[in-house]
Image (cartoon, rainbow, N blue to C red):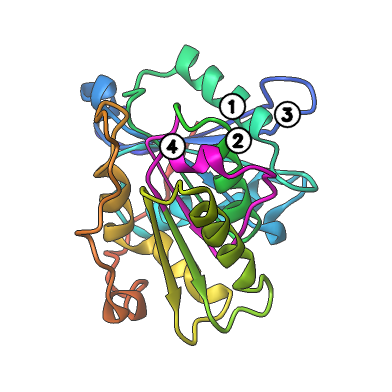
Amino acid sequence: MAQEDFLKAHDAVKRDGYPFWVYMPKDYDAYQSTTPLILFLHGASLRGTDLNKVLRYGPLDAVKMGLEVPALIVAPQNPKGHWNPQKLNDILEWMARHYVYNPQRVYVIGMSLGGYGALDLAGTYPDKIAAAMALCGGSTLRDYRGLGGLPLWIIHGTADRSVKIEESKKVVEGMRRLGVDGRLRYEWISGASHGDLARYFYLVSTYDWLFMHTLIEPRRPVDTSIQITADEKANAYKQIKRRKGELRIE
């Protein structure tokens, strides 16, 4: 296992829970205790009961294409409706019992419906998530106070017709009113459509930003040093070195 990347499918850990993929990076055996964990939440188009749909875009697809992400990647599938934070936490608790990784470096990233899920999970369990990134989403939370407890990066395109940018702005403005925006970073991408933001999953800088944060840091400040340029986004798919062959699926 130390020389290959592995992808393994798991059934739901509880009744009515989410089935999920777990990606184990190359040399995982050698670095288990320091390995981060990334939870990826897909959008509405990948909902259903075919777990293979979750491989169509996102971190797992980026890894399949050749991007090196030195982390466990957990990618559940939501059959219908909004993401349920408790069901996602059930997966994280199961992972803690069955895999070895650094519990101080657990991250969540999601797009569209997954952007809602990322913020809903982070706001519900801020002490478990080191940092969260929400792409073209929003939040169903009634209280945004929990979102103030961890570093967040909210990103939305101004030309998004599927999920209006007002959904993300509502979260930002709500956090400001509560005075809990000290760890918030947000960005409105001029002219970007809904699908344009999928490019972030294919950028090294996205994962570098997540990895800048840890639960160990008592102040838990949000990193603003990592900037993702328009050129990086435009060339997101071209910059990946194509992988030879497929991931090994257990």
Give the alpha-carbon distance from disc 4 to disc 1, as whole Å: 17 Å
**Mark drawn on residue 149:** 4
Is residue 25 magenta-colored? no
Give the alpha-carbon distance from disc 3 to disc 1, as whole Å: 10 Å
Give the alpha-carbon distance from disc 2 to disc 1, as whole Å: 13 Å
For the N terminus, the quadrant is: top left
Q: Which residue is mark 2?
A: 20
Residue pictured at 24% horizontal, 30% vertical: 217
Residue 205 shows in this picture = yes
Q: Nearer the viewer, residue 55 or 93?
A: 93
Is residue 144 magenta-colored? yes
Residue pictured at 47% horizontal, 56% vertical: 61
The residue mark sitting in front, 2 or 1, is 1
In the rendered image, residue 79, in percent from the top left (x then y), is placed at: 77, 44
Query: 120 above or below 209?
Result: above
Q: Which residue is mark 3?
A: 17
> Relative to 157, is 187 on the left or the right?
left
Secondary structure found at label 2: strand
Crowding near pointer 4: few (<14 within 10 Å), some, many (20+)? many
Query: 109 above or below 28?
Result: below
Residue pictured at 32% horizontal, 63% vertical: 203
Secondary structure found at label 1: helix
> Relative to 178, is 64 on the left or the right?
left
Q: Which residue is mark 1?
A: 89
In the rendered image, residue 98, in percent from the top left (x then y), is placed at: 48, 15
